[in-house]
Structure formats: C-alpha cells, structure tokens
Image (cartoon, rainbow, N blue to C red):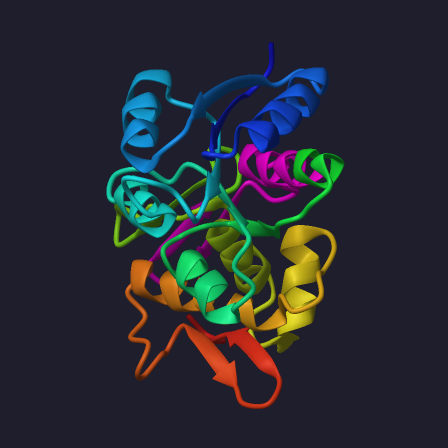
C-alpha cells in the first residue's frame, strides 16, 4: 500500500465510502471516530496525512488540529459541514492545509489528498536551496531554517514561502498564490491565504504587526521584501 491516511469522522457511512476510494487509489487507511481516539491512533500509526472532521464527539476537530500542530507538521485536510467562513479560517490558522465542505465527492477528497501529498514530496521543486537573509529553504528535504534553527512549516506554508522567496519584490494576488500552491482555486477560498500568511510570518520571525519579510500590498496581496 502507499501513503497512510488517517480519517477522523464519526459518520460511519462517510468513513466507509472515503476509505474505499482511498484504498482503491492505493492508499493505506486508518480510522478514528472521535477526537481523543484520533490522537491515540495518530501517535501509534504515524500517518502521512489526516482527513479531519470538525464536528467530533469527545474532542472538537479544531482542538484535535491544535494538538497535532503542537509537535507535528503532518498535512491536515478538514472535512466540515460548517459553512461559516470563520470556522474554515480558524482551522487554517491552526495549521490545516486545505478543507472540503460536506457534502462532497469522494473523488474530490482523493484528488485533494494527492495534491497536498505532492506538495509535501516537493516533486515540483526546480531549485534545491533558496536563501534570503536569515532564511534558508531546502526544496529537496522540504525544510526551512531561520538563523540556523528549524521552522516547522505545513506543506501549504512551505510552498507559499517558496513562491514568494523565488521572486522578491513581485506582488502576488491571493488568487495567484493559491493557484501556485494548490494548482487550482476554489470558490470562497481566496481570503484563507491570509491565515496561512499569518502563520508563516509567525514561524519565520516576521512581526505580523510590522512585517519586514512578507509584506502586505493593500488591496492586492503579498510580496517578499527585496534586498533580504
């Protein structure tokens, strides 16, 4: 079997269908039906990606994401029936890489899983090491250091940094950034890039109140500072 996926959802029908499609696509699958069980299974199974429902018994999905992010940068895709944008933003600010809104096509879930895992593996990397000031990004090992210390970035944060650091001074709209890191954009997703940028700034030591590395271009998007 291929990469291992942890599905965390208390709806048995959804788990059965998604598991079937993932296994058909040559993924290995493990399952948890509540938040506490999810953390236990995660520690024992060490999955390559987590499909995480937000509405869970015992422990909310957002709390699970928060717990995972304390010591892991494993990719997380949220499965949510919540339609409020604030819920999606909170999940992304906690470090989730993507989300799928219920009801969804299981084929879409498989496609999202493949996209995120491709980013983790760095298959599109053309330049191995990028440096800007105190930041060093290694596309081969998919690691980032700041002043020689590792910065634990999620796959989405890593790819955003890579896009920006490659072209200092170039202004990217939010949609352009999403197109670069996701390969495609989704309705209602544009503003969520702000959550990823917020996390990225914090992890690379860029003061969100007075950023000097990743600069906001008001009304347009973001750019990486020149002359770093």
Q: Quadrant of the C terminus?
A: bottom left
- Vertical order, 119 against 196 (above or below): above
Residue 113 part of the magenta segment: yes
Taking depth in this image into account, of 144 and 200 the one nearest to the observer is 200
- Vertical order, 69 against 24 (above or below): below
Q: Which residue does the image show at 49% across and 61% down from the upper left?
A: 88
Specify whether residue 132 is in view: no
Left/right of residue 182 with respect to residue 164 in the rendered view: right
Residue 177 point in image, percent of width and height: 63, 65
Left/right of residue 191 with respect to residue 92 in the rendered view: right
- Vertical order, 180 against 119 (above or below): below
- Vertical order, 109 against 43 (above or below): below
Q: Which residue does the image show at 36% across and 33% down from the upper left?
A: 34
Q: Quadrant of residue 219?
A: bottom right
Residue 195 point in image, percent of width and height: 45, 67
Residue found farthest to the top: 1
Residue 156 point in image, percent of width and height: 52, 51
Taking depth in this image into account, of 6 and 219 the one nearest to the observer is 6
Taking depth in this image into account, of 82 and 132 the one nearest to the observer is 82
Residue 92 point in image, percent of width and height: 45, 58
Q: Which residue does the image show at 32% across and 37% down from the upper left?
A: 35
Q: Quadrant of the N terminus?
A: top right
Q: Which residue does the image show at 52% across and 62% down from the upper left?
A: 165
Left/right of residue 146 with respect to residue 48 in the rendered view: left
Q: How many marks?
A: 0
Residue 226 part of the magenta segment: no
Specify whether residue 79 is in view: yes
Magenta span of residues: 111-137
Taking depth in this image into account, of 131 and 99 the one nearest to the observer is 99
């Amino acid at each position: 079997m291929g990469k291992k996926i942890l599905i965390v959802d208390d709806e048995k029908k959804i788990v059965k269908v998604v598991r079937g499609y993932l296994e058909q696509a040559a993924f290995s699958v493990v399952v948890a039906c509540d938040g506490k069980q999810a953390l236990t299974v995660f520690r024992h199974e060490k999955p390559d990606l987590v499909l995480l429902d937000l509405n869970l018994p015992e422990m909310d999905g957002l709390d699970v994401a928060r717990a995972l992010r304390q010591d892991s940068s494993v990719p997380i895709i949220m499965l949510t029936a919540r339609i409020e944008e604030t819920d999606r933003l909170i999940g992304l600010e906690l470090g989730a890489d993507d989300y799928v809104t219920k009801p969804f096509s299981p084929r879409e879930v498989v496609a999202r899983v493949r996209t995120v895992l491709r980013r983790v593996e760095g298959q599109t990397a053309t330049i191995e090491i990028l440096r800007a000031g105190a930041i060093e990004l290694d596309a081969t090992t998919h690691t980032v250091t700041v002043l020689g210390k590792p910065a634990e970035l999620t796959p989405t944060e890593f790819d955003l940094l890579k896009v920006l650091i490659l072209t200092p001074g170039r202004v990217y709209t939010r949609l352009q950034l999403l197109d670069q890191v996701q390969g495609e954009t989704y309705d209602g997703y544009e503003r969520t890039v702000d959550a990823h940028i917020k996390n990225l700034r914090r992890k690379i030591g860029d003061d969100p109140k007075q950023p000097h590395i990743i600069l906001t271009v008001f009304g347009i998007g973001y750019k990486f500072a020149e002359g770093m």
